[in-house]
Image (cartoon, grey):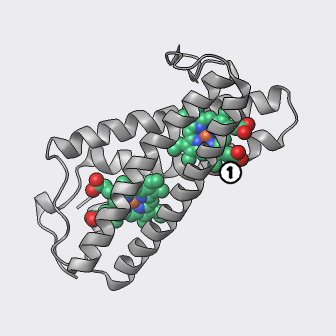
């Protein structure tokens, strides 16, 4: 196995953010799909407010992660990647970042257009960006669903690539794992 030098690894903070966000995103998609399929009532309300709060958490953590990347606190691409793999991972990572910002913001706009405020675990409410307009809210949520589908496609490609690196045992997986 190739030994990865210190600066080639993600920091403990970046690794923690990566795995918290990964778990959140994997839970958000089925929970989101459930909301319009549940009967109106306290269960739908609970699933929806939890989905919104966790989605807002993903938005905040992604902005923090982007700030770390812009500040040069993320490692350069692994030296073992071929030029094609480097380009493919760049496109996939960029798409993931973009979808983890655009997707939640669209969800927030959709909730506003539906006539409600997006709340973060009841601690505070996000600013109201749109006035109530239910027809617009339906269109916004169609876009939100499209973002959800794109995020699933990007995650499948990303996890498949991670699986290949794990089988090759080329040190890429270790960059995103705690320890060493
Ligand atoms: C089993 C699931 C997953 C595995 C095994 C995995 C593994 C990895 C690994 C090894 C890297 C580092 C790649 C490198 O060194 O170039 C990475 C980076 C990344 N992962 Fe994942 N990941 C998983 C799920 C997810 C999910 C669900 C998301 C988001 C929806 C995600 C978003 C990202 C992003 C944005 C990066 C790039 C970080 C950066 O350099 O700025 N990952 N992942
Ligand atoms: C990365 C973060 C997010 C992902 C991956 C995600 C994903 C999804 C998906 C796949 C659906 C199902 C859409 C449908 O079946 O029509 C959904 C629904 C929904 N999402 Fe999200 N979501 C995220 C963040 C948010 C945020 C931040 C909010 C609001 C603040 C939000 C509010 C909603 C609402 C209210 C629904 C139900 C829409 C309806 O009743 O048609 N989501 N979400």
Query: Which is more toward the observer, 136 or 58?
Result: 136
Q: Is residue 61 left or right of residue 76?
A: right
Residue found at x 39% / y 80%: 164
43, above or below 169, in the image? above
Figure disc tally: 1
The x, y position of residue 32, in whole percent, is 67, 44
Q: Is residue 150 above or below residue 57?
A: below
Whether residue 25 appears in this view of the structure is: yes
Q: Which one is nearer the viewer's eye here, 173 or 40?
A: 40
The residue beneath circle 1 is 30
Of residue 47 and residue 19, the one placed in the foreground of this image is 47
- In this rendering, position of residue 107 left or right of residue 99: right
Q: Quadrant of the N terminus?
A: bottom left
Residue at (22, 41) in percent of width and height: 68
Q: Is residue 173 visible?
A: no
Left or right: 108, with 164 as reference point:
right
Tell me the quadrant of the picture where the C terminus can be found. Answer: bottom left
Figure quadrant, ligand 1: bottom left
Q: Is mark 1 within 8 Å of ligand 2?
A: no
Helix, strand or loop status at disc 1: helix
Please name whichever residue, 121 or 113, is drawn nearer the observer in this view of the structure.
113
Residue at (71, 36) in percent of width and height: 138
In the displayed orientation, state which residue is furthest to the right.
39
How crowded pointer 1 is (Cα within 10 Å; few <14, some 14-19, many 20+) is rated as few
| Residue 175 position (above or below residue 104) | below
Task: Answer with the quarter of the image where residue 128 lies.
Answer: top right
Q: Return the x and y of residue 52 as percentages of the image width and height.
A: 60, 32
């Amino acid at each position: 196995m190739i030994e990865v030098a210190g600066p080639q690894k993600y920091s403990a903070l970046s690794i923690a953010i990566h795995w918290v966000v990964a778990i959140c995103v994997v839970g958000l998609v089925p929970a989101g799909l459930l909301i319009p399929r549940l009967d109106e009532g306290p269960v739908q309300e609970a699933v929806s407010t939890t989905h919104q709060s966790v989605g807002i958490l993903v938005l905040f953590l992604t902005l923090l992660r982007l700030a770390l990347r812009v500040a040069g606190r993320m490692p350069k691409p692994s030296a073992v990647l071929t030029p094609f793999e480097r380009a493919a991972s760049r496109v996939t990572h960029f798409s993931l970042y973009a979808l983890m910002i655009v997707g939640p913001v669209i969800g927030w706009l959709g909730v506003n257009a539906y006539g409600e405020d997006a709340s973060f675990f009841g601690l505070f409410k996000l600013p109201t960006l749109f006035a109530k307009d239910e027809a617009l809210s339906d269109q916004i949520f169609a876009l939100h669903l499209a973002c959800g589908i794109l995020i699933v496609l990007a995650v499948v490609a990303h996890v498949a690539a991670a699986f290949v690196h794990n089988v090759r045992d080329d040190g890429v997986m270790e960059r995103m794992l705690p320890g060493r």
